[in-house]
Amino acid sequence: MNRSDKDETGQSAPAPERRGRGRPQLRSDDETRALIYDAARREFSERGFAAASIADVACRAGVSTKTLYRLIPTKLALFEGMVTDRVERFVSIVNLGACDGRNVAAALEAALLTCAELILDAEVIALQRIILAESDKFPDIAETFYEKAMQRSIAALANWLGVQQRRERIVLDDTEAAAGMLLGMLVFKPQRDVMFGHKPVLTRSEIEARAKACAKLFLSGCAVPADQINKQSGGA
């Protein structure tokens, strides 16, 4: 099933597949792309960027190679689409959580849990290890991951913090800087433990406990001062 892929740097792919007249489409192109991105995530995390096979991604997704190339023309585009697809789903969850009516501690725990489930996922950590190993040869994949995953994750959490600040639940000087610090506290050590082979990926219960502890520690440092709360209450 393996074949040599010739599109690592964005070279032209085979001609698009033509669908026979009257042939029904079993699923939409968006649904097919989702299957392909899930398959690509497994392929890239297991084999790396250079060794990953477009033909094997198609096989994993249950589609033809021609169909894959019709929707996603190059291996680099496949990598970028895979990263973007996963992060956009994460951002949607975080943004939705910013609008709920829970108290700020419970809401922050939920937001951090969503962040940790993405960043501390075994496949995501494997991808980062591969990106670091192959970035000299394929700098575009490192830039893609930095912009589409790392920066988007920080921006999503910064936006969440901004919503809470506008609701006067927290006080921060710089939401983006705070988001970076908060994510670092949440994921830096367990992520490095896995990347360097010292510990396994955290379990769900361990992630929940870490999210709760980080939320408590963070909020104790940016909570609205008591005198300000009293002023707000008095002016209500």
Image: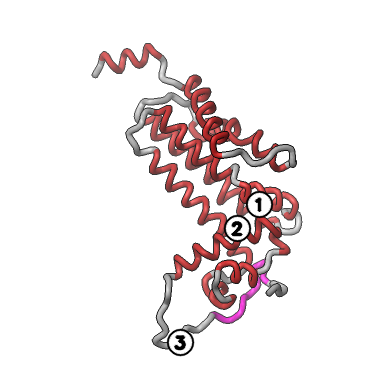
Q: Position of residue 11 (x, y in %)?
A: 65, 72
Q: Residue furthest bottom?
A: 21
Relative to 89, 7 lies left or right: right
Mark 1 and mark 2 residues within 8 Å of each other at the beta carbon: yes
Q: Which residue matches tag 1?
A: 127
Q: Secondary structure at mark 3?
A: loop
Q: Position of residue 182 (x, y in %)?
A: 55, 31
Q: Residue at x 74, y 41 (%)?
A: 196
The image quadrant of residue 183 is top right
Tell me how many marks there are.
3
Amino acid type of the residue that numbered disc 2 sits on in the rendered structure: Arg
Asked if 208 appears above or below 6 in the picture, the reply is above
Q: Main secondary structure of the magenta part?
A: loop
Q: Residue at x 55, y 45 (%)?
A: 118
Q: CA distance from mark 1 to mark 2?
A: 8 Å
**Coloring scheme of the render?**
secondary structure
Relative to 45, 177 lies left or right: left
Q: Residue at x 55, y 60 (%)?
A: 38
Q: CA distance from mark 2 to mark 3?
A: 30 Å
Q: Position of residue 177 (x, y in %)?
A: 54, 32
Circle 1 Cα neighbour tier, 10 Å, few/some/many (<14 / 14–19 / ≥20): many
The image quadrant of residue 55 is bottom right
Q: Which residue matches tag 2?
A: 41
Look at the image and tell me in which quarter the N terminus lies.
bottom right
Look at the image and tell me in which quarter the C terminus lies.
top left
Amino acid type of the residue that numbered disc 3 sits on in the rendered structure: Gly
Where does the magenta region start and end?
7-16
Sequence-first disc among 2 and 3: 3
Sequence-first disc among 1 and 3: 3
Q: Which residue matches tag 3?
A: 20
Asked if 151 appears above or below 80 in the picture, the reply is above
